[in-house]
Image (cartoon, rainbow, N blue to C red):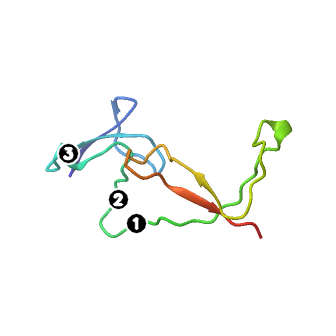
């Protein structure tokens, strides 16, 4: 249960999606919560681990890679909200 919502350490009556907030939670143990977790109503969010994206790779002159990217190359990514775990997420690059 959320008993208080704060934005910049000031209590507010509500917050919008995307706002950075601090929440005072009751009946939830501290070891069950980690920084960056999403708070949502039960069964309202479907988590996913796959996505499609368009990327722009910097040329050598723009400060990018010196070696070409070939099909099958795997980018290592680390979103800032993921906890530190043993494995790192990978993005596989398939040229088409």
Q: Nearer the viewer, mark 2 or mark 3?
A: 3
Residue 73 lies, in percent from the top left, at 66, 58
Sequence-wise first label, 2 or 1: 2
Which numbered circle lies on residue 84?
none
Residue identifier under label 2:
40
Q: Position of residue 68 (x, y in %)?
A: 78, 51
Q: Nearer the viewer, residue 96 or 55?
A: 96
> Do the numbered discs 2 and 1 sit on residues whose CB atoms are within 8 Å?
yes
Say what secondary structure mark 1 lies in. loop
Q: CA distance from mark 2 to mark 1?
A: 7 Å
Nearest to N terminus: mark 2 or mark 3: 3
Question: Is 12 or 24 nearer to us in this picture?
Answer: 24
Position of residue 50 relative to residue 89, above or below, is below
- In the image, is 47 to the left or to the right of 95? left
Q: Position of residue 9 (x, y in %)?
A: 35, 29
Q: Residue at x 20, y 45 (%)?
A: 31
Q: Left or right: where does residue 61 sit relative to residue 89?
A: right
Q: Residue at point 77% right, 70% down? A: 96
User: Label 1: which residue?
Assistant: 45
Q: Which mark is residue 31?
A: 3
Which of marks 1 and 3 precedes in the sequence?
Answer: 3
Q: Quadrant of residue 7?
A: top left
Q: Position of residue 47 (x, y in %)?
A: 42, 65
């Amino acid at each position: 249960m959320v008993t208080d919502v704060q934005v910049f350490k000031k209590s507010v009556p509500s917050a919008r999606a995307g706002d950075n907030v601090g929440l005072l939670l009751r009946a939830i143990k501290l070891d069950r919560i980690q920084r960056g977790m999403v708070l949502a109503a039960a069964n309202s969010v479907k988590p996913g681990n796959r996505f499609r994206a368009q990327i722009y790779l910097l040329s050598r002159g723009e400060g990018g890679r010196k070696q070409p990217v070939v099909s099958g190359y795997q980018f290592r990514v680390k979103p800032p909200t993921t906890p530190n775990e043993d494995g790192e997420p990978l993005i596989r690059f398939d040229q088409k």
